[in-house]
Amino acid sequence: MNQQINQPWRKGILVSILVFIFASLYSFVRYNILRDVPYAEIPLFIMNKAISLSSIIIIGFSFLLGPLAGMFHHRFTRYVPLRKPLGLIGFGLASVHAVVSLILLSSSEYYGKFYTESGAFSALGQFSLLFGVLALAIFSVVAITSLPAMYEQLGEKTWKKVQRFGYLGYLFVLLHVVIMGARGWIDPKSYVYGFISITLLSSLFIIFVFLVRIIARAHKCEDCD
């Protein structure tokens, strides 16, 4: 019994490690190698980008498994048990990203566009932070209801409704990263050697997840959630 429970977690952790390695290498190459960001910025500034991208991809994988299993039953149904560990790991990384971001926000050196000349938060910064906080709050509720005891207390119907709020949180993440990075997307220098910004890569992945869900719903799959 314990082995059956631990197996999805083992696979989920493995997937998460691979995603984090990819995100870390991507962030290192794009910012430290191609954009000459000092290596001293790796521990917090660069790793925070990797953590952010990892959380978005891992949570996205959690959302993708249901629609993919509904459309391609024989190929993806066996991976459905990974949704819970991936979702919780992604939430954990998002929480770490929030804490590190608060540390970095203490200095306008990292996110100067979030501040006005007087040192106050700009409207851009406030909206980006607002959507980030809303997303984390929603993911917190979804994570709490992932506990077995909550499923029994809420019942299947209510539990599924709460879990679907995760998509709203993911939409808020999209708004968070778009507001944060859209201005830089029009800068040709942002596309050096095809390494697009973390915010653009994150946005494209989130949009892809939503498109897959829309297509799955259009096909009236049985297990889109």
Image (cartoon, grey):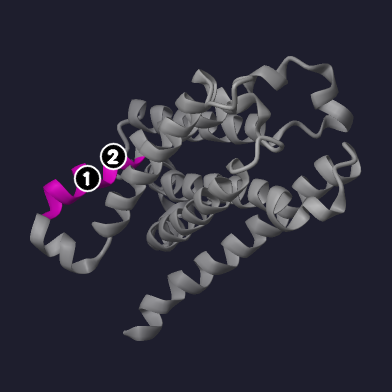
Q: CA distance from mark 2 to mark 1?
A: 5 Å
Residue identifier under label 1: 162
The residue range painted magenta reads 155-166
Marks 2 & 1, CB-CB < 8 Å contact? yes
User: For numbered disc 2, what is the local secondary structure?
Assistant: helix
Three-letter code, disc 1:
Val
Examine the structure image and report whether residue 164 is included in the region drawn in magenta.
yes
Q: Nearer the viewer, residue 151 or 33?
A: 33
The residue lying at 42 percent from left, 45 percent from top is 63
Q: Position of residue 3 (x, y in %)?
A: 40, 84
In the picture, the quarter occupied by the N terminus is bottom left
Q: Which mark is residue 139?
A: none
User: For numbered disc 1, what is the local secondary structure?
Assistant: helix
Residue 23 visible somewhere in the drawing:
no
Seen in the picture, residue 36 relative to 92 is either above or below; the reply is above
Q: Nearer the viewer, residue 140 or 151?
A: 140
The residue lying at 30 percent from left, 32 percent from top is 220
Mark 1: few/some/many CA within 10 Å (<14, 14-19, 20+): some
Which residue is outermost to the bottom?
Answer: 2
The residue lying at 34 percent from left, 34 percent from top is 168
Q: Position of residue 110 (x, y in %)?
A: 69, 38
Seen in the picture, residue 98 relative to 202 is either above or below; the reply is below
Q: Position of residue 151 (x, y in %)?
A: 17, 60
The residue lying at 73 percent from left, 58 percent from top is 43
Q: Nearer the viewer, residue 73 or 138?
A: 138
Residue identifier under label 2: 165
Seen in the picture, residue 6 relative to 159 is either above or below; the reply is below
Three-letter code, disc 2:
Phe
Residue 218 visible somewhere in the drawing:
yes
Mark 2: few/some/many CA within 10 Å (<14, 14-19, 20+): some
Q: Is residue 158 left or right of residue 220?
A: left
